Amino acid sequence: MLKNRLTFLVIPDTHGESKQVSIRWWVVYAAAATLALVVVASFFFAGQYVTGQVDQSELDRLRAENQQLAQKYEKIRWDLAETNSRYHDLVQKEIAIRTMFDLPEINTEERQLGIGGPGSPGLNRMSESEKLAYRTEVEVDRLLRLSEFEIEKYNEVEDELTSLQDRLAHTPSIWPTKGWLSRGYGMKFDPFTGYKQMHRGIDVANRTGTVIIAPANGVVKSVGKAGGLGKMIVIDHGYGFVTRYGHLSQIMVQRGDRVKRGDEIALMGNSGYSTGPHLHYEVWRNGKTLDPREYILNDM
């Protein structure tokens, strides 16, 4: 069939001469195929052009987003650097507090929590943005773990200081009355016998009726008369501390009363074995007498 011809008869207007044109069939097929190829190619290249334009637009958008993310990560890293600096300041303050109050120290290795070691094995295959994101994530994780550890240690310090504050509140650390020291602690001459004997407290002399105050928080353990000490009060302060007050003229508390540092508990007198109005004041700890002046922090 390809050898057959397709004949076209061309008839012009009334004054022209008719012509006959013969075209082989293969030429027709070739022309049709060429036309189809051109159409397909046009669609293909048009599609490629449109796709290229879309891809370029998407690429531009992704690049812009990538730049914005890089800027945000950079700002985050600056913030992390400042946070890290503040964390180290807190650590130094915690160390200072521990030193000041003689609390157990924390060694450097324990503070680091085992942080360190090799980086991500795929780090070399990452882009710069991915590396920045990875390092930022690692730094955030490190600071979070360190901050949790530091919060735990601050809670320990708070508990220790709370306990210390309570212990200090129950330590007899102020003068229980006003006056002048007439006799100290230790081996002293007895004013009645003239012989040296152990004086288990201190004597503060003043006028009868001078107010006696509690030198620390505690509970009144006993009140009443005690031989040579006359009218006497005993206060249990806890933590092994007990104080005794003798030669009183008037007792202003009862057994079982809770007292705080500075509360009025009695009036100075001359009861019992005494040569004049004064307060005999003793400090005991764990069953042994101590020199009260070693604990007194204020002026009389």
Image (tube, rainbow, N blue to C red):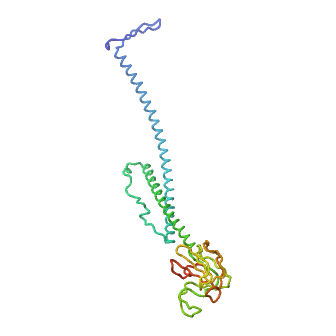
250 in relation to 127, above or below: below
Q: In which image quadrant can residue 17 be found?
A: top left
Q: Is residue 56 left or right of residue 231?
A: left
Q: Nearer the viewer, residue 32 or 147?
A: 147
Q: How many marks?
A: 0
Residue located at (55% from left, 90% from top): 188
Q: Percent x, y for residue 257?
A: 62, 72
Residue located at (63% from left, 80% from top): 177
Q: Residue furthest bottom?
A: 194
Quadrant, the C terminus: bottom right
Q: Is residue 40 left or right of residue 254?
A: left
Q: Nearer the viewer, residue 267 or 4?
A: 267
Q: Percent x, y for residue 209?
A: 68, 82
Q: Percent x, y for residue 135?
A: 43, 53
242 in relation to 56, above or below: below
Q: Nearer the viewer, residue 172 or 272?
A: 272
Q: Residue furthest top?
A: 14
Q: In which image quadrant can residue 109 be found?
A: bottom left
Q: Percent x, y for residue 225?
A: 61, 81
Q: Nearer the viewer, residue 283 or 49?
A: 283
Quadrant, the N terminus: top left
Residue located at (63% from left, 89% from top): 275
